[in-house]
Each structure stands twice: as structure tokens, then as C-alpha cells.
Amino acid sequence: MEKEYVRCQIEEGMAIVTIDNQAALNALNQPTLTQLDQTFAALAKNQDVKGVIITGGGEKSFVAGADISEFNQVKGDTAASFMGRGQRIFDRIEAFDRPVIAAINGFALGGGNELAMCCDIRIAAENAIFGQPEVNLGIIPGYGGTQRLPRLVGPGKAKEIIFADERINAQEALRIGLVQRVVPKGQAVEEAKKLLKKIMSKGPVAIKMVKKAVNEGLAMSLRGGQDLEALCQSVCFSAEDKDEGARAFLEKRPANFKGK
Ligand code: COA
């Protein structure tokens, strides 16, 4: 039987997905990527799950990159499909229709930083270290790093990080906008749960539409993005959640959203 590298625990409507291969600092080998993809496919069908937290097993590492020991199997003519597979798995996580928070508990290097960047929000423990060290191996980031990092921190900073393998600590990651919160070591998952519970108390249709408008709008012109925003708003105004939200406000009580 294949080793279990990805654990998924569901509590109070939150799925906590843990990449757990601590002997290799949770490096992403191919079975781990497959299990991660299967986990998200199952979560997509589970409407009891309102949001997801991704973290790494242990206290030392979130994910220390793609599994370097697999690289000798990859050649020039297979690299594009090998990397493309990982890119598509990360794209599916990014497009997951409920919020996904990365709780970064240690090293987030290479594919680890790329996995964190495809999440909606990143919370770092103060021992977290970020980087894209691929050029040390004579290759480039392959799971979206050359594209998502400049979008998050700007092209100059992204090139500095990638060209020189500049490692970024949690406070610096906060300063440059790579992460949104820094918490004491061991507290990232708890902080992510707190934030996710708050998000889960809002209108689920609205949250889904915010995610769609922001993610898809980033690839559009300002005008096109605003057209998309207006369409997403139509979806919200057609949903029962909107009537319940307004009613609850007028009746001075918390809204009881149904997510439809
Ligand atoms: N792929 C495969 N194995 C990895 C790995 C990776 N990306 N990162 C760490 N490991 C393995 C190490 O080979 C080591 O295995 P071993 O005990 O069988 O020798 C184990 O994890 C522990 O790593 P180690 O290097 O001994 O820990 P450290 O605390 O000295 O250093 C890092 C930690 C993260 C700085 C270092 O492991 C590292 O640089 N990893 C590679 C990061 C990287 O280049 N990622 C991008 C890949 S494209």
C-alpha cells in the first residue's frame, strides 16, 4: 500500500490538510502531489467543508520544495509535462471555490513557497523561512513561482529572491506582502482556524464571488475586471444569502446564511 503523505482532518467545517513526510522536510514527491490533488477533489464534493487550511507536519518545515531525488528521472523532453502536472494541481487549489489558508510552520522553499502562494491567505509562524532556491540546482521555479511571486511582491523583489536565492524570514515576508500575518512558532494553524471561522461566518456566496473576482480579475484589464465584479455581484443579489443578510441587519441579529 502506498504511504500516506497527505492527511486530512475535518473539524467544525474546516479541513486541515497536512503534508506529512517529515524525514524529507515534507518535500513534494509525485505520490504526495497525487494525494494532495485527490484530497482537494474529495473536498470539492464535500459541501460540509467551508474552508481549508494547508500546513506541514512537524515544527520544522511547511514544505522544503519539490523532491530533488526525483529530478534524475526528468529530462529536457519530459520536464514540461512533469512541471505542468504540478502547476495544474496548484491551479486547482487556487481555484478551489472556498477559502484556502496556508499555515506556514517552517521552511517554505521552492515548491513549498509555490504551494503557499496558490492559497488565498498566508499565515507564517515566526520560524518560517521562504525562498526559491532552484537556481542552485541549475533550474528555475517550476510550479508557478516565476508567475505568482512577481504578482505578489513585484518583479524586482521576485527576481532578487529567485536570482540570488535570497531567503526571507517571516517578518520580511510580512513586510513585502508575501504573508499576511506572523504568529509565534507553533501557532500558525490555530491562527488560521481563528481567521477561517471569522470568514465562515460571512455570506458563503459572497466569499466565493470575492475569490472569483479577485483571482480572475488579476489577469484582466481594470475594465474587464470590473465587468466581472458586476457579474459576480449579480450572482450575490440573486442568492438567498443576500435577503438573509439584509433581514438579519434590520432585525439586529446574526445572519444565518445558507450558502445559496
Ligand atoms: N527534496 C528531497 N529531500 C529533501 C528536500 C528536497 N527538496 N529538502 C530536504 N530534504 C531531505 C534531505 O535530503 C535530508 O534527508 P536525509 O536525512 O535522508 O539526508 C532531510 O530532508 C533533512 O534535510 P537537511 O538538509 O539535513 O536539513 P537541514 O536542516 O540541514 O536543512 C534545508 C534544511 C531546507 C535548508 C535543506 O534541506 C535544503 O536546502 N533543502 C532543499 C531545498 C530546495 O532546494 N528546495 C527546492 C527544490 S526544487
Image (cartoon, grey):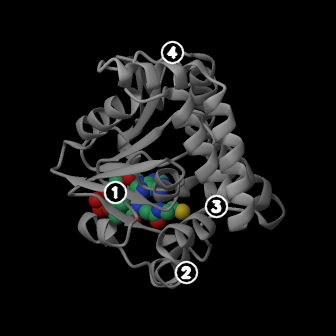
Could you say whether the residue bearing mark 3 is in a helix, strand or loop?
loop
Q: Quadrant of residue 22?
A: top left
Density class for disc 3 (Cα within 10 Å; few <14, some 14-19, many ≥20) is few
- Is residue 226 toward the left or the right of residue 46 in the image? right
Name the disc covering residue 155, or none.
2
**Disc on the earlier residue, 2 or 3:** 2
Q: Position of residue 86 (x, y in %)?
A: 66, 49
Residue displayed at 33% across by 71% down: 168
User: Is the residue 135 above or below the residue 2 in the image?
Assistant: below
Badge 3 amino acid: Leu
Mark 1 and mark 4: span between their CA atoms? 29 Å
Quadrant position of the C terminus in the picture: top right
As measured in the structure, the alpha-carbon distance from the residue carrying label 3 to the one carrying label 4 is: 29 Å
Q: At 26% from the left edge and 43% from the top edge, which residue is drawn?
A: 188
> In this rendering, does residue 3 appear at all?
no
- Dot 4 corresponds to which residue? 258
Between the C-alphas of marks 2 and 4, the distance is 41 Å
Q: Which residue is mark 1?
A: 180
Mark 2 or mark 1, which has the lower sequence index?
Answer: 2
At label 4, which amino acid type do we have? Lys
Going 38% across and 51% down the picture, which residue do you hit?
122
Q: CA distance from mark 3 to mark 1?
A: 18 Å
Q: Residue at x 51, y 85 (%)?
A: 156
Amino acid beneath label 1:
Gln
Marks 2,1: beta carbons within 8 A: no
Report x, y in % for residue 30. 62, 42
